[in-house]
Image (cartoon, grey):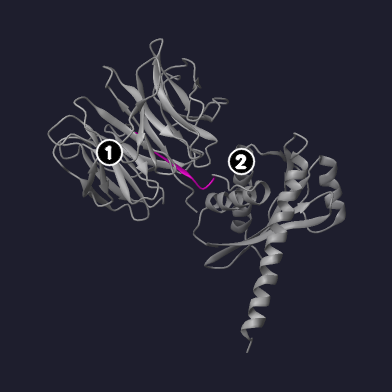
Amino acid sequence: MMNKKYLVSVFFVLASVAVTASSASRDVYLKLTAHGRRLDLGIADFAVARGGSVDDAKTARQSRDVARDDLIFNRAFNIVENGPVYTGKDEELRYWERLGADIILFGEFRADTTAVSVTARLMDVAGRSEIWSKEFLFDKKESPRKIAHTIADEVALRLTGERGIASTKIVFSNDASGSKEIYAMDYDGHNLRRLTDEHSIALLPKFSPDGKEIIYTTYRFGNPDLYSINVATLERRAVSKIQGLNTAAVFSPDSESILLTQSRGESPNLYLLDRDGSLIKRLTRFSGIDTSPSFSPTGNGVAFISNRPGYPQLYLMSADGADIRRVSTRGFCDSPAWSPRGDRIAFAMITDGKHNIFVYEVSGGRVLQLTFGEGNNENPAWSPDGRYIAFTSTRNSKKELFRMFADGSSPSRVADIPGRSFTPHWSPRLY
């Protein structure tokens, strides 16, 4: 039987090997990107283990193609394709080298009746050395897309030091059914799924930071009530059905409380509830309207909208309701969203008769415009890495979901979805 000293020694050896492999992959990435260029990442076809079926080969091909799209979207790499399957032969590496690949991603699928095993590897082409490998295990029923997203996010982590966002989803309201219902889809627009069947108005969905719940406002029972959906089971529960407004809700960063607008027989103000809906504290006391709160990532601050000056403007305050201060802007403001890195707040503002997306730089105090009058652009929502913003736009004559980089560049429609879409929110990384 192994003694404790031996087990500790084995643990440190294994930990050292893991750290060395991880460091090696990032070292290659940093060395190549230090000269101002993106890494050229070759993506080989994923091999299927001997005895694999036609379906296994199809799953391997689909997973490889989706992982490629995920890594293209990441924008940290130039993708190199059309090289041979890598089986360990030097002539195969030489071929990839001629194509210009710095590193190649390759993998092997193995499947039995219940499970799929995928071993993904990264090879430094110039150094002729494997710099990372990992085996992923999936249920046989798992979709090729989830397999691909998991691998792509891990590759991004190993090469750049930050996990990708391929595992994320976007939740939103849509009226294609004739009523406004809550839907969710993968970050890239695939796997559209309807989550509610309210036959009424359901809107303003927000993921919890732990990814386990979605809260939203529904008018199903006549009053704007706050409900929650369990992401795993789709079980619904009432959070707050107090007469009057229960709307524009958002979770605290620790997922333990909910900040929202309630009227409670008075003017709409901001109230803090626990996750079950019990009142913790009233944060604002104003005779007008305070709404659309957004927590800072630390939970210490809150951005919100108030009509204190006579029209809706962007305000900041401490999480306990103290130190309320106005951000200097020139138009009607709405839907602030604090960035995951805490440095910016995205919001919508009417300028020249149209809604556009702006960001407020928290430290410098500057307000920068990201969209410029291509329809009405509203409801910004940050990706969990802070590199992208989802929003709604009417640039194609109806309200649709778009996304852009955080500097406003490369706006594109997320997906062609029937009906009109409203109030998106980006999930945390879900797996």
To which residue does mark 2 refer? 69
The foreground one among 419 and 120 is 120
Instruction: Give amino acid for label 2.
Output: Asp
Mark 2 Cα within 10 Å, few/some/many (few <14, many 20+)? some
Q: Is 201 inside the magenta-drawn segment?
A: no
Q: Is residue 72 left or right of residue 24?
A: left
Name the amino acid type tagged 1: Leu
Q: Up-down: is 427 above or below 14?
A: above
Left or right of 147 in this view: 319: left
Q: Residue 238 at x, y = what percent?
A: 22, 48
Name the quadrant containing residue 147: bottom right
In terms of depth relative to the viewer, which is nearer, 159 or 261? 261
Quadrant including the N terminus: bottom right
Would you place residue 282 above or below residue 4 in this image?
above
Highlighted magenta segment, given as a residue range: 166-173
The overriding secondary structure of the stretch rendered in magenta is: strand
Which SS class for mark 1?
A: strand
Q: CA distance from mark 2 to mark 1?
A: 37 Å
